[in-house]
Image: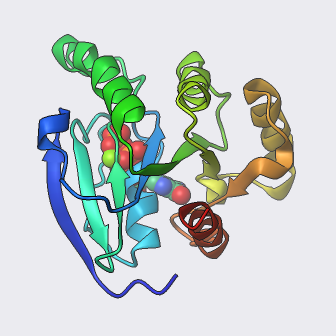
Amino acid sequence: MLVKTTEFITSATRPSHYPPGEMPEVAFAGRSNVGKSSLINVLLNRKNLVRTSSTPGRTQLINFFGVNGAFMLVDLPGYGFAKVPLAVKKQWGPMMETYLSSRENLRVVVLILDIRRVPTAEDRQMLEWLRAYSVPPLLVVTKCDKVSKNERARQAALIARTLEVEKEELHFFSALSKEGKDAIWVAIERLLSA
Ligand code: GTP
Ligand code: MG
């Protein structure tokens, strides 16, 4: 993908605030702190278009970014972090379900997992929602720079088994080395043109 222009469009919590129009969308979901915003920045060749943070729960709104004036990348708030205020947590489920179930132009959700962790019940829930709403998932396993090749293979098998998917469906990524960037773009482009 040749990224020519990128722009922040808007933040939203509910449909009346989503950007209007028919532009296809690619959304990024996963646990708090897993590296969603970092992945988007790498895909867009930007250091800080999307705010990243070592504090989990930084992204609490649905943030829309335009690419080449042709499609949007959507940074979703992460789940599963205990220290997020209760009010924010309560808002998260309905906000995500509304977005996933009602957004007609949503073409793919990139579900991001940490290579060092076993997927949680919430990760599995997310995958189930995507299936229920017929949104194709793209599975990305990130922070691969943190493990050895052997550990990667072992963890990939565990992650695939826990999510009940084939190992071949996992895309390996690192925001540090940028490993996997091109393959993820190819997969996104294929789903955008499907
Ligand atoms: P929330 O918005 O809070 O849900 O987090 P997020 O999923 O957007 O994570 P973010 O991109 O902000 O990254 C969280 C932390 O992980 C930051 O300190 C990043 O620098 C770090 N990080 C993200 N991706 C990688 C990676 O591939 N490798 C390493 N080593 N660190 C990463
Ligand atoms: Mg974020």
Identify the residue at image location x=78%, y=39%: 155
The residue shown at (70%, 56%) is 171
Residue 131: image location, x then y, percent: 62, 30
Residue closer to the observer: 191 or 3: 191
In the displayed structure image, the side of residue 9 where residue 78 appears, left or right: right
* Quarter placement of the C terminus: bottom right
Comparing 146 with 172, the one in front is 172
Q: Nearer the viewer, residue 65 or 45?
A: 65
The image shows residue 182 at horizontal and vertical percentages of 62, 76
**Residue 87 location in percent, x, y?**
17, 14
Q: Looking at the image, is 85 positioned above or below residue 56? A: above
Whether residue 50 appears in this view of the structure is: no
* Residue in view at x 26 percent, y 68 percent: 48
Residue 130 is drawn in which quadrant?
Answer: top right
Residue 84, percent from left and from top: 25, 22
Q: Is residue 111 visible?
A: yes
The residue lying toward the viewer, choosing from 100 and 115, is 100
The colour style of the image is rainbow
Work out whether 168 lies above or below 128. below
Whether residue 124 sits left or right of residue 79 in the image: it is right
Q: Residue at x 57, y 27 (%)?
A: 123
How many marks the image carries: the answer is 0
Name the quadrant containing residue 20: bottom left
